[in-house]
């Protein structure tokens, strides 16, 4: 059983981080319209995350040339305004506790004091970005109760794609960080 789960997590890059996470057990598999709503919400959220990350270039912009001074000034103003907004928001946010988590577009695994029974349906709220007050909602069945692992169910192709793009971006950033650290 452990092997099955690791296979899911090995199928593609895993994102490992300590993130705010809340999980709750569902009595039954949620109906199609709930899953559909969840997918739409996740899609919007992951797209927002993409544009948020695109708005934070690392040093020079993607084309390798500096942007104009006016644009830089505007970007700084925008950054400042966003920072203030997020500071206001984060003070009022009721985030769950952070836990070490590892996930890809197929499965999620996290450390939790109380495991869920195998086969149970679980809804996981995962806060992927400190600046985003909304969580991605993931749904799945527990494949390993002791290690809190769930196999993701109900994700449509768009959300699965966006999730794997998010993970890939983080992975690329991590690799770049390690290179520049050496």
Image (cartoon, grey):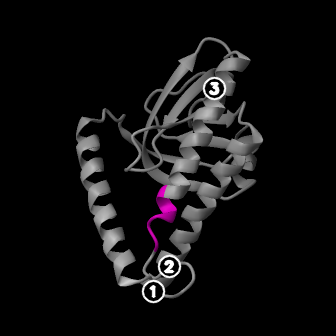
The percent coordinates of residue 149 (x first, y second) are 61, 36
Q: Is residue 142 above or below residue 47?
A: above
Of callouts 1 and 2, which one flags the residue occurring earlier in the amino acid sequence?
Answer: 2
The magenta-colored residue range is 52-57
Residue positioned 43% across, 31% down in the render = 113
**Image check: 174 left or right of 32?**
left
Of callouts 3 and 2, which one flags the residue occurring earlier in the amino acid sequence?
Answer: 3
Disc ID at residue 66? 1
> Circle 1: is it few (<14), some (14-19), or many (20+) Cα within 10 Å?
few
Q: CA distance from mark 3 to mark 2?
A: 36 Å
User: What residue does disc 2 label?
Assistant: 61
Q: CA distance from mark 1 to mark 2?
A: 6 Å
User: What residue does disc 3 label?
Assistant: 37
- Check contact, mark 1 vs mark 2: CB within 8 A: yes
Q: Residue furthest top?
A: 27
SS label for mark 2: loop
> Circle 2: is it few (<14), some (14-19), or many (20+) Cα within 10 Å?
few
Of callouts 3 and 1, which one flags the residue occurring earlier in the amino acid sequence?
Answer: 3
**Closest to the observer: 134 or 15?**
134
**Closest to the observer: 165 or 114?**
165
* Quadrant, the N terminus: top right
**Image check: 176 left or right of 141?**
left
Q: Write down the quadrant of residue 4 in the picture.
A: top right
SS label for mark 1: loop
């Amino acid at each position: 059983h452990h092997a099955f789960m690791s296979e899911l997590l090995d199928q593609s890059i895993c994102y490992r981080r300590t993130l705010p996470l809340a999980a709750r057990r569902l009595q039954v598999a949620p109906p199609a319209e709930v899953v559909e709503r969840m997918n739409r919400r996740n899609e919007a959220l992951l797209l927002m995350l993409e544009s948020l990350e695109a708005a934070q270039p690392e040093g020079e912009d993607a084309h390798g040339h500096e942007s104009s001074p006016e644009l830089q000034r505007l970007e700084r103003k925008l950054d400042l305004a966003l920072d203030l907004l997020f500071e206001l928001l984060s003070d009022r946010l009721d985030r769950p506790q952070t836990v070490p988590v590892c996930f890809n577009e197929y499965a999620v695994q996290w450390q939790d004091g109380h495991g869920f029974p195998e086969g149970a349906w679980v809804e996981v709220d995962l806060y992927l970005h400190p600046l985003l007050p909304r969580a991605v909602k993931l749904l799945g069945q527990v494949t390993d109760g002791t290690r809190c692992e769930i196999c993701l169910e109900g994700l449509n192709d768009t959300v699965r794609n966006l999730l794997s793009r998010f993970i890939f971006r983080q992975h690329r950033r991590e690799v770049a960080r390690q290179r520049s650290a050496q």
